[in-house]
Amino acid sequence: MKLFYDVSLKELKRWLDEHGETAYRAAQIFEWAYQHDVTSFEEMTNLPTDLRVALAEAFTIGPLEPVTLAEDEAALKALLAMPGGGDVECVAMRMEGYTSACLSSQVGCAVGCGFCASAMGGCDRNLTAGEIILQLITLRAKVGPIRNAVFMGMGEAFHNYEAVCEAIDRMTDKRAMGMSPGHITVSTCGVVPMIHRYAHEGPKTELAVSLGSADQGIRDMLMPGVSRWDLGDLMAACYDFSQARKGQPVTFAYVMLAGVNDQYHDVDRLARLLSAQPHHLNLIPYNEVPDCPYLAPDEPTINTFYRRCREAGLNVSVRRSRGQTIDAACGQLRRRAGV
Ligand code: SF4
C-alpha cells in the first residue's frame, strides 16, 4: 500500500478518475488529510462509503506511533519507524508563541561531519516526500499546530533534493498544509551545485548553510563529505542564492567547538568570508555527543566570540539549543532507540 502523503493532488485526481470518481473529491480528501489530521479514510464523512473503502485499500494515512518518545519542557523528540524501512528522529521545539519542527530527510547521512551523531553509520537511504511529511503529521498529533519547520534533523537535505522540494510543495500548498514558505528553512552542509539549483528553481524558503569553519583545512577535516567544494565555490553559490532571491540573506550555522574554531583568528576569517554576503551568522555552542571527540566551548569564550563577531560587523546571534536534556539538540539526532 502506498503512503497517502506521497501522492500529489494531480496523482490523486488521476487515481479518482481511474476509479470513476470526479476530480473535485481530491480537494476534499486533501483537506481531511492535511487540515483535519484524520487518522483513517473512514473519518472523511462527506465521501461516499465505496470511495472511502477504495482509498483505505490503496493508501495508508495518519500519524505513526513513535518507537520511542522523549520530552522536556522545551522539546519533544520522536523516533519513528519509517514505512519504507529504517528509523529516523524528528523533534518538535516549543518556541515563544509557536512550535517548530526539526525534520529528517534521510535515514542516516553520508556527509560524515565529525561533530554529528547522525553521521555515525553512513546513509542507508533517502526518505520519500511522504515520509518527510509524515514526521510533521506525527509531531502535530502529539503537540498540536506547528508553524515552522527546519530540515536540520538527520540527513543532508540536498542529497535528497527532489523529495525535499516535493515535501515543501505540499507543506506550503494552501490546499494541503498551507505553511508559509518563509517559515521553512532548508539546511545544507554546502552541496554547491544544489544551492545554485535551489536558488533559481527551489521553493521560496529560507536557506541555512552549516559552515563548520571559515578555514578551508579545518572545514575539510570537520565536514569531509563536502570537501570537494572549496569555500570560494560555497560563497559564490550563497551569493547566487541571495541575488536570485532579491537580497535574501543566508543563515550560516557555526557549531562552536572548543579549541577548533572558537579562537580570535576564527572571527577574522568569518568576517572576511561573510562581509560581502547578505548573511545571518548563527553561533551554536556544541552539544557534546558520546563517541565524538569534540567539546563545547565555555561561556566566557562563547560570549567573547559573539562580541568580537559583532564588533567585526557581522550580523550574529547565539542559538541556545532546545532539547539538550533529551539529546534532541543540533547534531544529536540518531536513528536507533537507546543509542
Ligand atoms: S551535520 Fe548534517 S550533513 Fe553533517 S553529518 Fe550531520 S546530518 Fe549529515
Image (cartoon, rainbow, N blue to C red):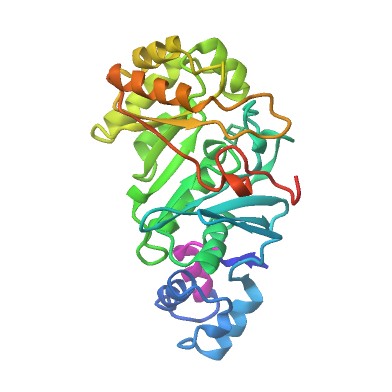
Decide: is 20 above or below 229. below
Decide: is 14 above or below 326. below
The front one of 338 and 39 is 338
Coordinates of residue 21 in the picture (x, y in percent): 48, 81
The front one of 320 and 165 is 320
Q: Quadrant of ligand 1?
A: top right
Decide: is 152 above or below 137. above
Coordinates of residue 79 in the picture (x, y in percent): 66, 55
**Quadrant of the rendering where the N terminus is positioned:** bottom right
Question: Magenta segment: does it hold 13?
Answer: yes
Res. 53 image quadrant? bottom right
The front one of 182 and 193 is 182
Identity of the residue drawn at 49% across and 34% down: 188
Coordinates of residue 40 in the picture (x, y in percent): 58, 78
Tag count: 0
Q: Main secondary structure of the magenta part?
A: helix
The front one of 219 and 72 is 72
Residue 128 in sight in this render: no
Identity of the residue drawn at 45% across and 88% down: 46
Res. 331 image quadrant? top right
Report whether 169 appears left or right of 48: left
**Quadrant of the rendering where the C terminus is positioned:** top right
Report whether 64 appears left or right of 16: right
Coordinates of residue 161 in the picture (x, y in percent): 51, 41
User: Which portion, as a residue range, is magenta?
Assistant: 5-17
Identity of the residue drawn at 55% across and 52% down: 91
Question: Magenta segment: does it hold 307?
Answer: no
Report whether 39 appears left or right of 279: right
